[in-house]
Amino acid sequence: MEEIPVYLFTGFMDSGKTTLIRQTLLRDHFGEGAKTLLIVCEDGDEEYEEDKLKEANIQLLMIEKEEDLTETLLKNINLQYLPDQVFIEYNGTWRMDTLLETKLPEGWTIVQSLATADAGTFDMYLDNMRAMILEQMFQADVVIFNRCTNDTQKGKFRRAVKAVNRPAQIVYEREDGTLDEREEELPFDLNQDVIEISDEDYAIWYMDAQENYKKYDGKKVSFLALVYNPDKMKKGVMVPGRFAMTCCIEDITFLGFKCRYPESKSIPHKSWIRITAEIRVEFAMEYKGKGPVLYPIHIETAKEPEDELVYFS
């Protein structure tokens, strides 16, 4: 059966989903001539002009209740409309599982998922309903922060998204629609002889080192670490790192780096150390490609910190 592409748009209320869909379908003439079914699960401030949709061969269907989104409903919709492509504007307050665990009609395939966020309100939502807003982004291929200004905390927003969705591409867009291409500032100095990584900055540094490892090649770093080094670990290798809370207390993950150290077996599993090491970019099976590998210069035992966790905020 011929594939019917499904384009999924997620994001919290008033994040710009409708504007993006309207621009894609009407201004950019996406899939021009194709019979498009637009499923809208949220009645936002922005509205679709049905006469323009009709001119573009787009049929609009509203689903008002989360419990109405079922396999049977979608199957009947497919038979009724026989679309060439489907756009879904998902409700920002509905659980993502409701959609992702619902069997789609035969041939329907989600080919791209885009999440939108208003840069002006995202910080407030992070502070007050972090789990809910990030759930809308955890499987997005692209996350678009719109309405950005010079005061937008691009680094903080990127870290929040990458904590739950590392592969996501992130785009920053200004009010006038142009891209905000300012570089994100880091809270530590890359030009230090030894880059001192504080507990507050560990998660930020980890994400940056994993994504932009080339700029750390040959750099020296120092940080407090919990050592992952069980008996089954290969001799000469250990993994110093920290446990990080990504979204909520239920989502805690260990963020560590491969470390080559001939005396690794002398470092007990789950012990605390202060490590100073040189970073070398190498191929590592653990990274499934190239990445930052630590070569210790100095290691000393350390006390367990008051808070074992590090954070992305």
Image (cartoon, helix red, strand yellow):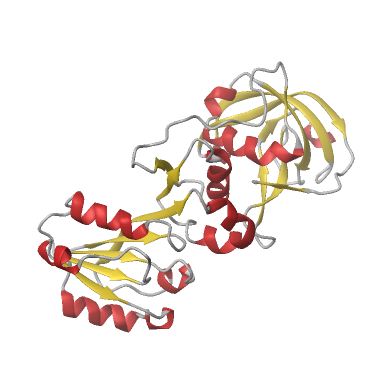
* Residue 304 x/y as whole percent: 87, 44
Residue 169 visible in the shown view:
no
Residue 176 visible in the shown view:
yes
Q: Residue at x 34, y 37 (%)?
A: 178
| Closer-to-camera residue (37/261) | 37
In the picture, measured across the screen, residue 139 lies left or right of residue 284, that is: left
In the picture, measured across the screen, residue 306 lies left or right of residue 288, that is: right
- Which image quadrant is residue 205 in? top right
Q: Residue at x 46, y 68 (%)?
A: 96
Q: Is residue 76 above or below residue 31?
A: below
Q: Is residue 59 above or below residue 178?
A: below
In the picture, measured across the screen, residue 23 lies left or right of residue 267, that is: left
Q: Where the N terminus falls, by quadrant? A: bottom left
* Residue 68 x/y as whole percent: 38, 83
* Residue 86 x/y as whole percent: 24, 65
* Residue 88 x/y as whole percent: 31, 66
Q: Residue at x 66, y 23 (%)?
A: 189
- Count of marks overlaid on the render: 0
| Closer-to-camera residue (36/258) | 36
In the picture, measured across the screen, residue 210 lies left or right of residue 277, that is: left
- Which image quadrant is residue 249 in? bottom right
Q: Is residue 55 above or below residue 312?
A: below
| Closer-to-camera residue (267/170) | 170
